[in-house]
Image: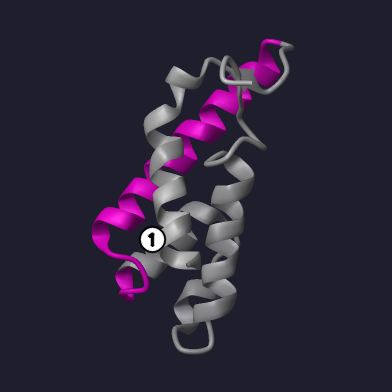
Amino acid sequence: DDQVFDVKQSPGGLMDLEFLVQYLVLRRAPAFPAVATWSDNVRQLQAMTEVGVLSASEGEGLREAYLAIRSQLHATVLAGQPGQVAPVLLQDHAAFVRRCWKQILS
């Protein structure tokens, strides 16, 4: 449905972003053990940026997307609503996650 963005399951949403981060941690930890130091996505993204697994713009863009998506999910849950929002609220972040997904996993 183009009228609704499912914060968790829509393309570019939370599941895609978390999968991408975990894929990179598993793929790159043998060469860059620092990326597996932390268990949270924000610090994993920071570590991947620091060691060069991600460029500064990729790391910052994914961190910003993660924080925005999580914040929107928390807001909907606290309001007693399903994790669905108007697509415009997260369209830029979701598009960035999809671009990174395509670049990294293709």
Whether 78 is among the magenta residues is: yes
Q: Quadrant of the N terminus?
A: top right
Percent coordinates x, y for residue 12 in the rendering: 52, 41
Q: Using the rendered view, name the quadrant where residue 53 is placed.
A: bottom left
Residue 37 seen by the camera: no
Q: Residue at x 38, y 60 (%)?
A: 46
Determine whether 95 is above or below 80 in the image: below
Tag 1 secondary structure: helix
**Label 1 is placed on what type of residue?**
Gln
Q: Which residue is mark 1?
A: 46
Count of numbered marks: 1
Is residue 15 shown to the viewer in this render? yes
- The part of the image, by quadrant, that contains residue 36 is bottom right
Classify 10 Å Cα crowding around label 1: few (below 14), some (14-19), many (20 and above). many
Which residue corresponds to the image point at 52% horizontal and 28% vertical from the top-left?
Answer: 71
Name the colouring of the figure.
one colour
Residue 5 higher or lower than 64, as above or below: above
Query: With respect to residue 100, does 68 lie above or below?
Result: above
Q: Residue furthest left?
A: 56
Residue located 40% across and 62% down the image: 103
Could you tell me residue 7's position as x and y percent?
61, 30
Residues drawn in magenta? 50-79
Q: Is residue 95 above or below residue 17?
A: above
Q: Main secondary structure of the magenta part?
A: helix
> Which quarter of the picture shows residue 22?
bottom right
Residue beneath the point at 48% across and 67% down = 106
Q: Position of residue 101 (x, y in %)?
A: 48, 56
- Where is residue 18? Give x, y as percent: 59, 52
